[in-house]
Image: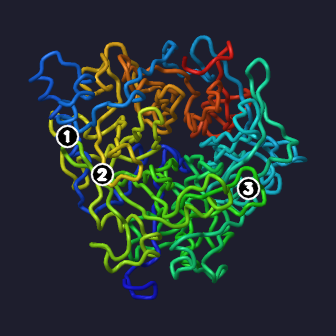
Amino acid sequence: MSSDNSSSGFAPLNWISKRTRSAYHCKISCDDACFKPVPNQSGNEPFAAILNRRISRRSLVRATIAGAPLLALSTSPLGSQIFGSAPLTSRADAASSTVGLQSIPHDNEDAINISDGYSSNVVIRWGDGVIPGAPDFSLSCQTAEAARKQLGFNCDYNGFFPLLPGQSQRGLLGINHEYTSPVDMFPDYDADNVTSEQAAIEIASHGMSIVEVSRADNGSWSYNPSSSHNFRITGETRMMLTGPGAGSIHTITQADPTGAEVLGMLNNCAGGRTPWGTILTAEENFNQYFANAGTAGAVARYGLPELASRRHWEDFYDRFDVSREPNEPNRFGYLVEIDPYDPSFTPRKHTAMGRFKHEAATVTLSDDGRAVVYSGDDERFDYVYKFISNDRYNIFSRSANLDLLSSGTLYVAKFNDDGTGEWLPLAAGTPPLHAWTNAQIATFTKLAADEVGATPMDRPEDIEVNPINHRVYIALTNNTRRGTEGYDPVDSANPRGPNTHGHILELTENGGDAAARRFTWDIFILCGDPSDAEQETYFAGFDKSELDSISAPDNLAIDANGNLWISTDGQPSKLGQADAIYVVPTAGPERGRIRRFMTGVPAGEMAGPEFTPDFATLFVSVQHPGESGGLDEPTSTWPDGDFPRPSVVAAYKDDGGVVGT
């Protein structure tokens, strides 16, 4: 493995589809109905064991210091010794974040319900015209040509970009289209007889839409179908690879002997905004689109299907057939940079930030001005990553920053029992990666992280940096395999095995610097039903008798006061409740008091929470409403009452004020 041309044993990687609520559902955790083995068989100590000892320590503290609230401990010098959290010292850290709304009850209605004093409206639906002159959507007469001009399927991440600096009433909304579910798209769909046109429509319905949106005087939002700012990115859009993986022997294909140009992006889930005004969008479960990968080499670690795919795109496009194009899968699974202000900009897949099932792409700046990007690998027993650029952010030159994410160092997290942790570098020439090349690390990142001893986590999803307290919040959706598949069992002190409901971590970088190599961590929320005495739940020490149930935390957002907003993906199967949007203070006497702000529709995930700069609007995606019912018997007909259509909604306060206050 001393060079890219060596015989390293890095055969093209293979996958099995990860998520299977229905035959094509790639958003709900594979924990719900997955028959494949856990991909990570590295033997690294699982986070389950660490968390078990951590909670046990909490129990000991409760018994030893009778009546002492955990909040007081976690924000005192004693608490920092016991729990590993740095004491709150700055004025911003000590500020009390509060929420000025009442929690709404859970429901399973086929409607969006929202807290009193708030309203919401649908901004844009699947099939609505994006490119000026796009044809009207027709369920029975879909074409790939039309789909390339219309809003794609299954919206997820939303990113708002003002058209004027600081403007909140008008801007561009970038909307990810994570995946397609053909049984919910095509009348009389036959999975055994997929047509070439259906495959082409699916490919065109992936990617991203950029649309101009504006707010009316009453607070409602609409999009402008005639705007010259609107454009589409699809699974066919020309893109370029950057960084150490670009042009290597691992990315060369028959169609692209340069190994530097890729057609399209696939399964884009969460994302983020860069300080220089671009979108960074995360390719997640890209493995499901390929076929005939066999079982050679390190294929099990990435999970491509051994034989045919469920979509059968390989029947019409050689690039999805790994037996014909063995390196094509190596060109997916990256963070992709897009300029929402420039339709002519060639999207860039930055290999320096690693190839895995990216969930999240949260960008901040280090104390010395370098770009720092947090991302999780959304797989059971996989890892949390951080990338630090080599060069510094240039406040005077936007164009100079467009190369900022092409070079730097990728790190992976190791969590210790005592509430400390460290970022382990993934760099060629450093033990135990002394025989690896940077191209191999960029392409086979999961295996490199296995080698250095990273901590396996319970499906890291979104990661957000709180600008008020400078802490990092990590959503871990769930892992019902914890304690199985050869991993350490849990005991009675740790009811998180299996971890059905997930949890949220609070991480503090040493010195508050995003580029720090060490950190402390604490458990912020152990999700579940706090009224269930048999469940171990924890809400930052807040009295559980006053709290709502929550399960499967997915995407996160931070408001102007430092409150954490949480969208869920999986509550129908975990709690029998619709997915929802929650808000919880991160400081002050209400720290940990979670409230339900908005509820979704049957089988529909709530995703992509995004505020406008004035925090007067919250955009939310309602993904796969009515999924699994098919078009013949949909479990939802939201939003128009005829057939389900994934859509983006805007939520706003009736008096025009700041959301959440």
Q: Which residue is mark 1?
A: 52
Q: Which residue is mark 3?
A: 201
> Disc 3 to disc 2, how far (Cα)?
47 Å
Q: Residue furthest bottom?
A: 6
- Depth check, mark 1 against mark 2: the one in front is 2
Q: Residues within 10 Å of mark 3 (few under 14, many from 20)?
A: many
Q: Secondary structure at mark 3?
A: helix
> Disc 3 to disc 1, how far (Cα)?
47 Å
> Disc 1 to disc 2, how far (Cα)?
22 Å
Q: Is residue 162 left or right of residue 417?
A: right
Q: Residues within 10 Å of mark 2 (few under 14, many from 20)?
A: some
Quarter-wise, where is residue 437 in the image? Answer: bottom left
The mark nearer the N terminus, 3 or 1, is: 1
Tag of residue 607: none
Q: Position of residue 404 (x, y in %)?
A: 57, 61
The mark nearer the N terminus, 1 or 2, is: 1
Depth order, front residue of 116/302: 116
Quarter-wise, where is residue 238 in the image? Answer: bottom right
In which quadrant of the rendered image does the N terminus lie?
bottom left
Marks 3 & 2, CB-CB < 8 Å contact: no
Q: Position of residue 95 (x, y in %)?
A: 41, 23
Marks 3 & 1, CB-CB < 8 Å contact: no
Q: Secondary structure at mark 2?
A: strand
Q: Residues within 10 Å of mark 1 (few under 14, many from 20)?
A: many
Q: Position of residue 600 (x, y in %)?
A: 57, 27
Q: Which residue is mark 2?
A: 518
Q: Is residue 93 above or below residue 416?
A: above
- Depth check, mark 3 against mark 1: the one in front is 1
Amino acid type shown at disc 1: Asn
